[in-house]
Amino acid sequence: MNSRIHFTLRLIVALVLVQTLYFKFSAHADSVYIFNTLGLEPYGRITIGILELIAAILLFVPKTIWLGALLSFLIITGAIYAHLTKLGIVINGDSGKLFYLAITVFILSAIILLKNRKNIPFVNKKM
């Protein structure tokens, strides 16, 4: 994969993750609604926000790109599961925007993780 494309994918994932931090950390009504529905308000909202920030940073440290991609993949898998089981696709009339952003981050994180699989220490350790 071209390094520019790889960087662009990481940038998109990081921007989506960081963009949502304002809503989580400011206790925006939509974010509070989501985490109340999941029974995770406020600690889950804040913890997920911190983890998303860490994932976004790790995506730009060469040795930890794989870890940032894995962390974002796992977080977003939980978000998709929440949408499909408790929240629904459309939240507060957003036409599914949050769900489709989650699907985008899921796919891009998987691509980034696959691209960086050779850097995962416990996967490529010779025995």
Image: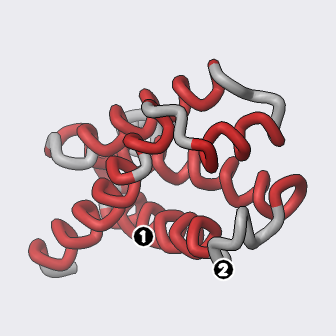
Question: What's under tag 2, amino acid-wise?
Answer: Ser
Residue depth check, mark 1 versus mark 2: number of the one nearer the observer? 2
- Pick the quarter of the image with the C terminus: top left
User: Is label 1 in a helix, a strand or a loop?
Assistant: helix
- Give me the disc on residue 108: 1
Image height check: is 112 above or below 4?
above
Residue 26, image x, y percentages: 44, 33
Question: What's under tag 1, amino acid-wise?
Answer: Leu
**Which residue is pictured at 28% across the width and 70% down the height?**
9
Q: Which residue does the numbered mark 2 point to in the structure image?
A: 95
**Which residue is pictured at 65% across the width and 37% down the height?**
32
Residue at the limit of the structure toward the front, as seen here: 29
**Which residue is pictured at 43% across the width and 28% down the height?**
50
Q: Is residue 6 left or right of residue 39?
A: left
- Say few, some or many: other residues with alpha carbon within 10 Å of mark 2 (under 14 / 14 to 19 / 20 or more): few
Question: Total of numbered circles in the picture?
Answer: 2
- Say few, some or many: other residues with alpha carbon within 10 Å of mark 1 (under 14 / 14 to 19 / 20 or more): many
Image height check: is 83 above or below 60?
below
**Residue 47 lies in quadrant:** top right
Closer to the camera in the image, 12 or 58: 12
Q: Is residue 61 left or right of residue 108?
A: left
Residue 42, image x, y percentages: 65, 22
Q: Is residue 28 left or right of residue 59?
A: right
Image height check: is 48 above or below 89?
above
Verify CB contact (< 8 Å) between mark 1 and mark 2. Answer: no
- Pick the quarter of the image with the N terminus: bottom left
